[in-house]
Amino acid sequence: MITKGIRGAITVEENSPEAIGSAVIELLQEMVRRNNIDIGLVSHAIFSVTPDLNADFPAKYARINLKWKDVPMMCFNELDVPGALKKCLRVLIVVNCSELFEPEFVYLKGAESLRQ
């Protein structure tokens, strides 16, 4: 078994706990669905947010709402690069998997512009 990373990103409507929580849940559920992720095989998850999203910790919503209680998670700020996409939440989910697994990255809402 090896590990592979699955990238995802979504824009958040506003800097509020409710909007951040909703975005985390939407993004993670879609990543799990598209990649058929068994949460028991998730090694860890790393969240990053742009500096304009500081109302809450994204990992909190994975832990509480999606029951990712045994997944180690950390949250960081993205670099404040001029002209970069605003109100963007990113995640890297690292999973234990077979070498044949081909991850599908997920970019939702305004974050779709990151991979055009």
Image (tube, helix red, strand yellow):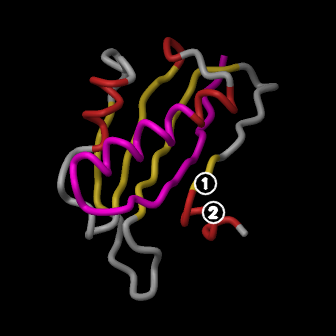
101 or 49, nearer to the observer: 49
- Quadrant hosting residue 24: top left
* Residue 104 located left or right of residue 96: right
Residue displayed at 31% across by 51% down? 19
What residue occupies the far right of the structure in this picture?
Answer: 100
Label 2: how many Cα within 10 Å (few below 14, some 14–19, many 20+): some
| Element at label 2 | helix
* Residue 98 located left or right of residue 72: right
Residue displayed at 71% across by 37% down? 103
Residue 5, placed above or below residue 42? below
Residue stretch in magenta: 1-29
Asked if residue 24 lies in the magenta stretch, the reply is yes
Q: Amino acid at mark 1?
A: Tyr
Residue for badge 2: 112
Q: Amino acid at mark 2?
A: Glu
- Residue 26: percent from left, percent from top: 48, 40
Q: Is mark 1 in CB contact (under 8 Å) with mark 2?
A: yes
Q: Quadrant of the C terminus?
A: bottom right
- Quadrant hosting residue 13: bottom left
Earlier in the chain: of badge 1 and badge 2, it is 1
Q: Which mark is residue 77?
A: none
* Residue 112 located left or right of residue 62: right
User: What is the tally of numbered marks visible in this picture?
Assistant: 2
Residue for badge 1: 107
